[in-house]
């Protein structure tokens, strides 16, 4: 039996999603809109044999948003360019179900999947920022519960459209002038609570069958959606105990949904701090915390609460009682901030400093960081990690000094053994729902609509 191995993604965020990362002299001020910058980072991740690169996105900003949010490339356009600049690494993008139509989403990701020869992945989100409503002709943001019902149906429609053509639908026989076998083209004819879509989609399946579905929710609704649809999950946890609880909960929910838990992989996002010694890495961490601008930390803290203005409160008083604030935004993140502040008796200042700077459980020498990664992996907290890519030299310390230790232990690949994203992740190719099931092909689970 093949030994279970770690999987790694690389989060490419240009000038950074924190308020001060862009000040690093290694990061160009226009990195978030510089395709050459993205190509360099994607190629570095591919050379290190990462499973995928990941592009975050959201449809709303304010003047106080973090630098990368203010000025960045649209994810599908960006990844289409990276598909031509790379050969093997997976290409994963965030796209909301709250303010898009399934037919467009299905076509965009199917196109990326064809362009990349089967390397596409979709990170399904429901959009937590209430201000996004105004960018799509709505006076109010869609209610949290409705957003998740819509997401279930949206994904089900997209996956149905991806099966519009059976794999041998196009004989392309010039002698007989027969391009399509019309019996193997299928309408969807979906009628649901939110969408009415006839189909078929005007593009065929890729070598991996369908793009891989990712998801990132940590709220109760988010966990339910993950268990129903996700094949990869970007877990919003930053300490071992929370990660292990989340991992066990998702695997349990997945099994209860009738899906194979081994086909759902969890990837917490982390930002390792690596130096020659543990003491040097800890000093770097302290220095970064000391450089944090408190005003900007308060802005960053407000984002999960729809950019709530925290400057109105006393800094050294206990974290304020916010009631239901955040419940219709990034609910899971907002609830976590409230819980941590309450349980640890934090002041507003302490809370802003805690969440305004990315927290890392992976601080130390390459050996220390490798040991901690192995502990999380072996003790049931993760299947892999999403590594934040900031300054190239810092990412190189991870790829050149930490990964070799993990490879020596048999925990990470020395080279690619597949050409598709599903192949990298060890996920089955989903059979087309319209084709008689071949015993050699496992049928991947698909989203099921859930009642309100």
Image: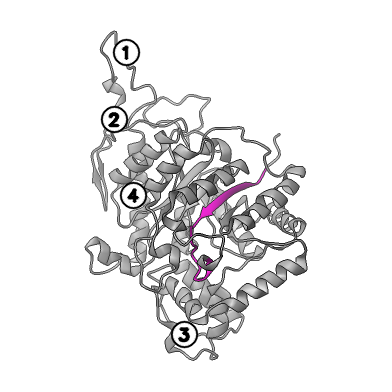
Decide: is 144 above or below 415.
below
Query: Does dot 4 land on a helix, a strand or a loop?
Result: helix
What span is in magenta?
A: 5-21
Task: State the residue at coordinates (55%, 51%).
Answer: 10
Give the residue pinned by disc 4: 154
- Name the mark nearer the viewer: 2 or 1: 1
Q: Which mark is residue 321?
A: 3
Q: Which mark is residue 173?
A: 1
Where residue 295 appears, x then y in whole percent?
48, 81
Where residue 420 appears, x then y in whole percent?
51, 35
- Name the mark nearer the viewer: 3 or 1: 1
Sort mark 4 into few (<14), some (14-19) or many (20+) by Cα contacts within 10 Å.
many
Which residue is more in the foreground, 139 or 415? Answer: 415
Whether residue 45 sits left or right of residue 303 in the image: it is right
Please report contact status of discs 4 and 1: CB closer than 8 Å, yes or no.
no
Q: Which mark is residue 402?
A: none
């Amino acid at each position: 039996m093949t030994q279970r191995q770690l999987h790694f993604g690389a989060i490419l965020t240009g000038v950074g999603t924190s308020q001060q990362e862009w000040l690093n002299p290694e990061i160009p001020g226009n990195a978030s809109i510089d395709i050459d910058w993205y190509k360099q980072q994607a190629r570095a991740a591919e050379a290190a044999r990462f499973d995928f690169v990941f592009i975050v996105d959201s449809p709303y900003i304010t003047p106080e948003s973090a630098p990368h949010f203010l000025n960045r490339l649209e994810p599908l356009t960006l990844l289409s360019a990276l598909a031509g600049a790379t050969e093997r690494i997976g290409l994963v993008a965030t796209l909301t179900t709250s303010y898009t139509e399934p037919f467009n989403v299905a076509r965009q990701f199917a196109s990326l999947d064809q362009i990349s020869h089967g390397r596409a992945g979709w990170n399904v989100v429901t959009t937590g920022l209430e201000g996004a409503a105004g960018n799509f002709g709505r006076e109010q943001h869609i209610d949290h519960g409705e957003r998740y019902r819509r997401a279930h149906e949206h994904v089900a429609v997209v996956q149905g459209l991806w099966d519009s053509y059976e794999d041998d639908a196009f004989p392309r026989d010039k002698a007989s002038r027969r391009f399509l076998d019309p019996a193997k083209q299928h309408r969807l004819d979906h009628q649901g609570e939110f969408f009415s879509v006839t189909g078929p989609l005007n593009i065929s399946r890729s070598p991996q069958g369908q793009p891989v579905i990712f998801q990132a929710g940590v709220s109760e609704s988010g966990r339910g959606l993950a268990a129903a649809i996700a094949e990869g999950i970007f877990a919003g946890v930053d300490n071992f105990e929370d990660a292990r609880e989340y991992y066990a909960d998702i695997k349990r929910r997945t099994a209860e949904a009738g899906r194979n838990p081994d086909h759902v992989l969890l990837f917490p996002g982390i930002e390792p701090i690596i130096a020659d010694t543990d003491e040097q890495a800890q000093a770097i961490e302290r220095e970064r915390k000391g450089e944090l601008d408190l005003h900007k930390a308060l802005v960053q803290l407000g984002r999960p609460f729809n950019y709530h203005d925290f400057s109105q409160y006393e800094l050294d008083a206990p974290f304020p009682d916010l009631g239901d604030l955040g419940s219709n935004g990034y609910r899971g993140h907002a609830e976590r901030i409230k819980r941590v502040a309450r349980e640890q008796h934090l002041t507003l200042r302490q809370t802003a400093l805690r969440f305004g700077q990315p927290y890392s459980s992976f601080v130390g020498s390459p050996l220390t960081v490798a040991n901690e990664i192995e502990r999380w992996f072996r003790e049931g907290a993760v299947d892999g990690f999403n590594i934040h890519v900031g300054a190239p030299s810092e990412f190189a310390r991870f790829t050149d000094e930490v990964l070799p230790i993990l490879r020596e232990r048999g925990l990470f690949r020395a080279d690619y053994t597949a050409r598709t994203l599903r192949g990298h992740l060890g996920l089955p190719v989903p059979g087309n729902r319209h084709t008689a099931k071949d015993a050699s092909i496992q049928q991947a689970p698909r989203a099921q609509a859930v009642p309100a």
